[in-house]
Image: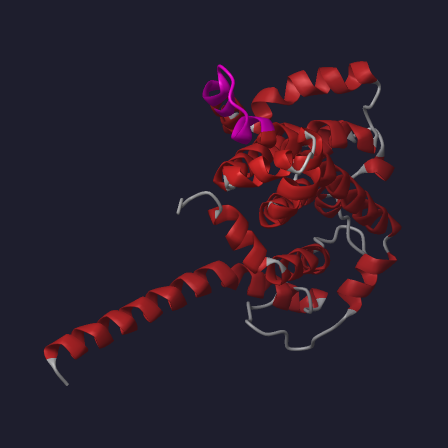
Amino acid sequence: MTSKQFRQRAQQVLLYTLVFIVAVYALFPFYWAFMTSFKTENEMFQSASYLPREPTMKNYEYVFRDNTFLDALRNSAFISAATSIFALVAGSFAAYALGRLRFRGRVALLYVVLSMTMFPAISILSGLYTIVRELGFFGTSLSLIVTYPVFSLPFTVWVLTSFFKGLPGEIEQAAIVDGATPFQTFRLILLPLTAPALVTTGLLAFVQSWNEYLFALNFTATNPSAQTVPVAIAQFSGQFSEQEPIAEIMAAAMVVTIPLVALVLIFQNRIVEGLTAGAVKG
């Protein structure tokens, strides 16, 4: 083996070692939560073990018998889907204007949109709380559908704007020659070409809304039937009095997390394509 081949082999070994370390670091919490969800109550308070000694499905049975959790699951699905659809509809129009049209202050407006994502959620909570109460949405799912786009919409606009900028101008010119109106060009030609970016932003907006806790806790405090999954899990009381329902919480977390992981795995190619769209111009 030559010195060059040795260096290449050493670099490969180092690379795979680093990848393995990062993978273990990232996946171990998920693995621990998954294994914990199958442990019994007695085993939870004994010595820690990487595998359940007496695996049980009782934790999952308790979760699916809990009507409060099931209602929260439905609420999260509805709110997250509505937020994603609104973000995609409003964001696509705004991104088209920012990415394809030329007007004064366009770049400044784009950076203002991006700056909206830099505010921590707690800093705007009191203002949104007042707005929600004035609108009469407090304690309902509408309070979350109205407030979640504050964070999901700017990200959607930013990603879609980069994608619209990368589309060739000849496409619009050909559509105009064929007699298409600007709205027809946008809806029938440009929008289908942004499918990777739409999938990416829609899925990320869905995940962000699905996992959000602060707004859900404060805006639905007076109406448990409108609470979302993160709030319902945080308020688990356990099957018995004075119980610390760690295993049940882990089981509920798996029920909530595994569908999201499946969605990401299914659309992973679209996600990568959408996030990298517009990064390189040919």
Rendering coords of residue 151 (x, y %): 60, 31
Residue under the image location 12 percent in, 82 percent down = 2
Residue range in magenta is 97-110
Horizontal placement of 126 versus 235: left or right? left
Residue under the image location 56 percent in, 41 percent down = 171
Q: Is residue 52 above or below residue 273?
A: below
Q: Quadrant of the N terminus?
A: bottom left
Asked which quadrant contains residue 44, the reply is: bottom right
| Residue 268 in view here | yes
Q: Is residue 104 above or below residue 56?
A: above
- Colouring mode (rainbow / by chain / secondary structure / one colour): secondary structure
Q: Nearer the viewer, residue 274 or 234?
A: 274
Residue under the image location 53 percent in, 31 percent down = 99
Horizontal placement of 281 versus 232: left or right? left
Rendering coords of residue 277 (x, y %): 49, 46
Q: Nearer the viewer, residue 146 or 44?
A: 146
Rendering coords of residue 23 (x, y %): 45, 64
| Residue 88 in view here | no
Q: Is residue 221 above or below residue 112?
A: below
Asked which quadrant contains residue 53, the reply is: bottom right
Residue under the image location 66 percent in, 36 percent down = 185
Horizontal placement of 22 versus 210: left or right? left
Give the overall secondary structure of the magenta segment.
helix
Asked which quadrant contains residue 16, the reply is: bottom left
Q: Is residue 108 magenta?
A: yes
Q: Is residue 234 magenta?
A: no
Q: Is residue 142 above or below residue 23?
A: above
Q: Nearer the viewer, residue 239 or 132?
A: 132
Q: Nearer the viewer, residue 259 or 103?
A: 103
Residue farthest along the bottom direction in this orientation: 1
- Total marks shown come to 0
Rendering coords of residue 216 (x, y %): 72, 34
